[in-house]
Image (cartoon, rainbow, N blue to C red):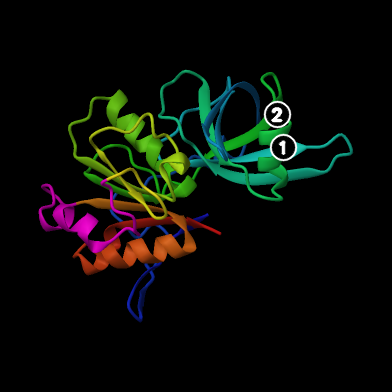
Amino acid sequence: MTETATTHGARTFTPPTPFAVPGRIEVSGRVAGRWQTATLTEIRRETPRAATFRLAVPGWAGHLPGQHLMLRLTAPDGYAAQRHYSLASAPDGSGHIELTLDHAEGGEVSGWFHEVARPGDRIEVRGPLSGFFAWPGDRPALLLGAGSGVVPLMSMVRHHRARGLSVPLRLLVSARSPEDLIYAREFGAETTPVFTRSAPDGTPVGRLSAAHLAPLLADPPAGGWEAYVCGSNAFAEHASRLLVAGGQPVDRIRIERFG
């Protein structure tokens, strides 16, 4: 799920280890290795194709923004399906976590959540997993996401707000249209939406570009940005190249990609 390579033109940079970045975060293998039973308590529609699922996990040990979990569904005949999903919620000690899932065409797990799941259903979860993409709020964060790639980044935004952090944080999020923009009701001054197919009157339509990043990279905060990129393979390649071209150090770009 976590990708660590970035590209710039024909040159490929691959860190010597998956954690070759400042601020490595260790994940407890004991906690992450244990399956727990979660109960679905709420379903919230985000867009026509995405919804947020709130789960109660009494034994949840907590997580950091940007981490994900393993989810397991088991059918009556014993068939089991497992998937990794990013955590959308900020860590709050409530014993609840949230996942936001796209309804993937033909997806057996996302299809079950969107078509079958109801509050009261039980699901197995294991985590939190991965420290590479986590952001504990200790350094300026420049977040770039597209589509459902905004999910772990929203956990960071929520954490930033909930803790009243003063460290700079900016989010650039790409969506096809305003109707496809996950969490649109929650975004504030820290967020710049980029629409690739249709946009409100007066808003340009097009891909994330160097012009969107230039003001942020030309005048970075003290200590510089830690950049987090999450989205499809194509978006991750495009966004990471823009960052490097704009002067962002390659060893301070963390990437999660899918598809």
Q: Is residue 203 magenta?
A: yes
Q: Is residue 133 left or right of residue 137?
A: right
Residue 248: x %, y % from top left: 22, 61
Q: Indicate the secondary structure of the residue bearing disc 1.
A: helix
- Report the magenta residues as a range: 202-224
Q: Is residue 131 visible?
A: yes
For badge 2, the amino acid type reads Ala
For badge 1, the amino acid type reads Trp
Q: Indicate the secondary structure of the residue bearing disc 2.
A: loop
The answer to whether residue 111 is above or below residue 228 is: above
Whole-number angstrom distance, CA of label 1 to CA of label 2: 6 Å
Dominant SS type (magenta): loop
Residue beneath disc 1: 112
In this view, the residue in front, 66 or 41, is: 41
Q: Is residue 39 magenta?
A: no
Which residue of the protein is positioned furthest toward the front in this rendering?
A: 201
Give the quarter of the image for residue 164: top left
The answer to whether residue 188 is above or below residue 250 is: above
Residue 156: x %, y % from top left: 35, 37
> At 32% across and 37% down in the image, what residue appears?
136
> At 70% across and 41% down in the image, what residue appears?
111
Q: Are marks 1 and 2 in contact (CB under 8 Å)?
A: yes
Give the quarter of the image for residue 231: bottom left
Q: Which mark is residue 117?
A: 2
Q: Is residue 146 left or right of residue 68?
A: left
Give the quarter of the image for residue 49: top right
Residue 126: x %, y % from top left: 60, 37
Residue 42: x %, y % from top left: 58, 21
In this view, the residue in front, 212 or 86, is: 212
Crowding around mark 1 (Cα neighbors within 10 Å: few <14, some 14 to 19, many 20+) is: few
The answer to whether residue 37 is above or below residue 157 is: above
